[in-house]
Amino acid sequence: MSTFLAVVLTVLLSVTALLALARLYRGPSLVDRVIAADMLLATMIGAVGAEAAVNRHATTLPVLVVLSLLGFVGSVSLVRFAVREQQ
């Protein structure tokens, strides 16, 4: 049963990543691309967290923290850049 759930989770995360990549590529504005990059990073965080849960280890916790901080700092800096461009 856990193998089935792992396959379903992998498929769902892969589809989410592909959709985020499509929006990142096709996004007409900078804001669309920023949101797509955040979604892709959130998908990566979910995938690493799911891998840690399936394999029952906590050694990837620092990776999750770094990815979360990267997403936060990247989002804030890109939004500040976008606001500065509009003024």
Image (spheres, helix red, strand yellow):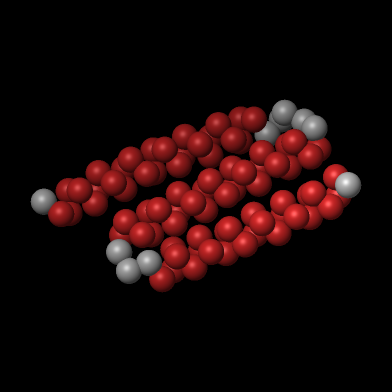
Specify the farthest residue to the left: 87
Residue 54: percent from left, percent from top: 79, 39
Residue 3: percent from left, percent from top: 86, 49
Q: Residue at x 51, y 36 (%)?
A: 68
Specify the farthest residue to the front: 1
Q: Residue at x 79, y 55 (%)?
A: 7
Q: Image height check: is 15 above or below 39? A: below
Q: Residue at x 72, y 28 (%)?
A: 58
Q: Residue at x 45, y 49 (%)?
A: 38
Q: Image height check: is 33 above or below 52? A: below
Q: Image height check: is 29 above or below 5? A: below
The number of callouts visible is 0
Q: Tell which of 66 and 8 is nearer to you.
A: 8
Specify the farthest residue to the right: 1
Residue 81: percent from left, percent from top: 24, 48
> In the picture provided, is 21 more to the left or to the right than 29?
right
> In the picture provided, is 30 more to the left or to the right than 84?
right
Residue 31: percent from left, percent from top: 32, 56
